[in-house]
Image (spheres, rainbow, N blue to C red):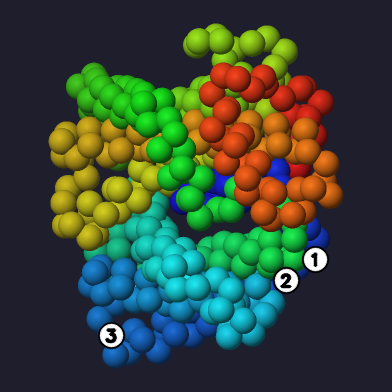
Amino acid sequence: MIHRLALRVMPRLALAVTADSVRKRKRWVMLASGLVAFLIYRLLKLVVPLSDPLILLAVSGLLSAVTAGCVYGLGRGESPTAIWNEDGVRRLSWVVGWIGFVYGVQLSLMVLALLKVFVNYDFLVHPDGPAMIAIIIACTSVARDAFEIGHVRRIQRQGEPILTFPDGAPLRALFLERPWVLAKWSLLGAAGCALLGVGVAHLAEVGRTELGQLVVVCLFAGSLAVWAYLAGEQRLDGWKLRLGSVSWAELFRFWWWPGLTFAATYYLTLVGAAWFALSMDARLPAFQALAAAAVGGLMGLYGYYLGHRRYVENRIQETVPPSLLRCPFVMGILSKSRMASGGGAVQPANAASGEAGRRG
């Protein structure tokens, strides 16, 4: 869900997709997608065994893929032919396949696990309710994100400066630029989460439950994400936070969202995959250790990446006139050059620039 993180953490993207006019259209799109998903569910349950978890996940993924393709077009605001010619097969496949099918399946697994862990509403025992909720939430969430991505692509085509398009390309570039830094934060998160989860499981019975592991993993991975974010944003001297560089209110907000929220989302998705896709007991010690390591590694990686992108965007927007940023050719060159020189040669953005970005 790196696209979801980028859409809310990057100030330029957040401002673009939360404007009043965009939010009104997005609400209608989500409502319509949810109603259509409900009607399709009611029809499919008569002919398709949606009580089978694998069939349910396949249906949810396919409906989400169709939703992503249609709603992305609404966000783009152009004809299908123009969208095909401008975006190409690769980007449209990413929208339909990743934002649609994969994201839809992930959301369905998360919903099924959330219902089982928090309210003991087990899909395998009572399939109808959880199946309906999983399909509707997956389709409405995919519709929201596909519409926002389509809108971002639309304003990008109109000449607006979008330095971090939410398709993961900047993350892949960062892998080539700083592989050892990313590996450090990922391994730190993976090892720390796994060891903490195993240790808590041996201390008490409650530590071996899904809920106990969820709490422990979320607290550690969410806190590590904040520290990794600050490191990526050049706000740390070694492991020490520079006083005055960031407010405690901002730290708490990032710790709560996306830190704890996305750590919980990833862990619940893995628990759902174990219970409903792999028919595995999610309380097995080996699975709990692997799931904790995966969540900790992802949150460390994503935290550093988001901080680095904030740093890059602050530096570019601080030093280049907005009129020049509107040129896609110049913007691309500047973005690459800043990423290449962002390790130590460039000094951190000033506090006024950072505060302006945080208000977005």
The circle on residue 25 is: 2
Numbered tag placed on residue 346 in the rendering: none
- Closest to the observer, 81 or 219: 81
* CA–CA distance in space, label 2 to label 3: 33 Å
Mark before the other along the chain sequence, 3 or 1: 1
At x 61%, y 34%, the residue is: 338
Residue name at image x 72 percent, y 25 percent: 349
From the viewer's perspective, is 323 left or right of 315?
right
Label 1 – label 2 distance at C-alpha: 7 Å
Can residue 107 be seen in this snapshot?
Answer: yes
Vertical placement of 172 versus 97: above or below?
A: above
Judging by the rendered image, the residue that carries numbered circle 3 is 48
Name the mark nearer the viewer: 3 or 1.
1
Q: Which amino acid is tagged 1?
A: Ser
Badge 1 vs badge 2, beta-carbon distance below 8 Å: yes
Q: Residues within 10 Å of mark 2 (few under 14, many from 20)?
A: some
Choose top left, top right, bottom left or bottom right for residue 241: top right
Residue 291 in the image: x percent, y percent?
Answer: 27, 39
Q: Residues within 10 Å of mark 3 (few under 14, many from 20)?
A: few
Which residue is label 1 attached to?
Answer: 21
Q: Amino acid at mark 3?
A: Val
Who is closer to the viewer here, 304 or 267?
Answer: 304
Does 349 sit left or right of 231 as displayed? right
Count of numbered marks: 3
Q: Are marks 3 and 1 in contact (CB under 8 Å)?
A: no
- How far separated are the C-alphas under marks 3 and 1? 39 Å
Label located before the other in sequence (2 or 3): 2
- Dividing the image into 4 quarters, which one contains the C terminus? top right
Depth check: 334 or 68 in front?
334
The image position of residue 15, as x and y in percent, is 74, 51
